[in-house]
Image (cartoon, rainbow, N blue to C red):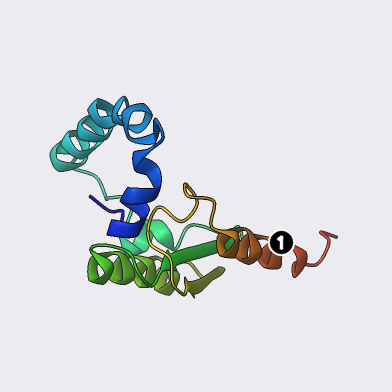
Amino acid sequence: MLGNQDELVAVSGSDYLDAASQYLPLVMQEFQQAAESTGPAPTDASELARIVVLVLVLYGSQTALGGWITRSARHVAEHVATAQLREVDGIGHFGPVVGEPAIADEITRFFTARPEPA
């Protein structure tokens, strides 16, 4: 589970986990397809380098499996030339689900700092 203990407590009174569980077969199918694919993975450096739009990569400092999540976020940021990487202090992977304002603040900052397109 990617949610930390505080986040799991926060969502336990809601139907979030039941609602999210309906997507588990699709996630498992995606893992299977990735394992069977002979082409490059979406996270290969060469594939990430093809991304030319602005990208915000957020991860929480309190995410369960934090080392894996942190390494993954840094990998994306290292290979997407337009990526901005930000660690959000004090939250985990379910930050957006539990309504963490810090996530909204980071997203707002990202979009408001961008110049208007020419």
* Mark 1, other Cα within 10 Å: few <14 / some 14–19 / many ≥20: few
Which of the 4 image quarters holds residue 118?
A: bottom right
Query: Picture coordinates of residue 79 (x, y %)?
Result: 41, 69
- Which residue is rendered at x = 33% and y = 35% of the image? 17
Q: Quadrant of residue 71?
A: bottom left
Residue 6 shows in this picture: yes
Q: Is residue 34 left or right of residue 50?
A: left
Point out residue 34 in the picture as x, y percentages from the top left corner.
Answer: 21, 41
Between 75 and 6, the one lying in front of the other is 6
Say which quarter of the image contains residue 117: bottom right
Q: The residue under label 1 is which amino acid type?
A: Phe
| Residue 50: image location, x then y, percent | 47, 58
Residue 54: x percent and y percent? 61, 61
- Residue picked out by circle 1: 111
Decide if residue 4 is in sight here: no
Q: Is residue 79 above or below residue 23?
A: below
Viewer-side residue, 105 vs 117: 105
Q: In the visual, does 82 lie left or right of 72?
A: right
- What's the residue at 49%, 64% (across, down)? 57
Label 1 sits on a secondary structure element that is helix
Camera-nearest residue between 58 and 76: 58
The count of marks equals 1
Residue 9 against residue 75 in the figure, above or below = above
Q: Residue at x 23, y 63 (%)?
A: 65
52 lies left or right of 94:
right
